[in-house]
Amino acid sequence: MRGWIRISRDRIRALLKRIKRPYSELEAWLDIEASVRFSEKPLERNFKGREFMIKEAQMLTSKKEFAQKWSWNKKRVQRFLERLEREKEIKIQSYKGIGLMITSLEYLRLKEELEEIKKRKKSKEKKA
């Protein structure tokens, strides 16, 4: 079944905060999707003494942060992220001793799809 649903990031974050057990993979994936930058304007951020430019659909984090947040061990986090990358859900850039820059490819696909829908709608309105 194709399509998508629109859910507030704040609502997702609020629901995830209530979890007092290890996250499921769905919850971990939702956490990533709710945490990536959604503004088109890049954000400059100092992370562990290094400057990073965080663009739309990206987040700067670490396996350790995910492990603590999701109540998983680092190995499980690693396997999960690698699988998401193989499945083309995310792209991972590793910075040794610093962390990970994660780009949500799903976010970018949905944004592209929404822009295409808007273009078609405008085109139909012009013809009417």
Image (spheres, rainbow, N blue to C red):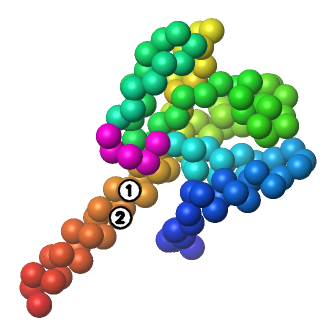
Q: Position of residue 57 (x, y in %)?
A: 45, 42
Tell me which secondary structure the magenta stretch mostly adopts: loop
For disc 1, the marked residue is 111
Q: Position of residue 55 (x, y in %)?
A: 39, 35
Q: Are marks 2 and 1 in contact (CB under 8 Å)?
A: yes
**Boundaries of the magenta span:** 37-41
**How many neighbours does mark 2 have within 10 angstroms: few (below 14), some (14-19), or many (20 or more)?**
few
User: Would you place residue 124 above or below residue 27 in this image?
Assistant: below
**Is residue 123 shown left or right of residue 27?**
left
Q: Secondary structure at mark 2?
A: helix
Does the magenta-highlighted stretch encompass residue 111? no
Q: Residue at x 58, y 24 (%)?
A: 100
Extreme residue toward the right, this view: 21
Q: Amino acid at mark 1?
A: Lys
Quarter of the rendering occupied by the N terminus: bottom right
| Residue 76 in view (yes/no) | no
Q: Position of residue 112 (x, y in %)?
A: 34, 56
For disc 2, the marked residue is 114
Q: Residue at x 48, y 19 (%)?
A: 46
Q: Amino acid at mark 2?
A: Leu
Q: Find the distance from the CA under tag 2 to the CA under tag 1.
A: 5 Å
**Is residue 8 shown left or right of residue 42?**
right
**How many neighbours does mark 1 have within 10 angstroms: few (below 14), some (14-19), or many (20 or more)?**
few
Q: Residue at x 80, y 25 (%)?
A: 75
* Frontmost residue, 127 versus 68: 68
**Is residue 10 shown left or right of residue 27?**
left
Quarter of the rendering occupied by the C terminus: bottom left
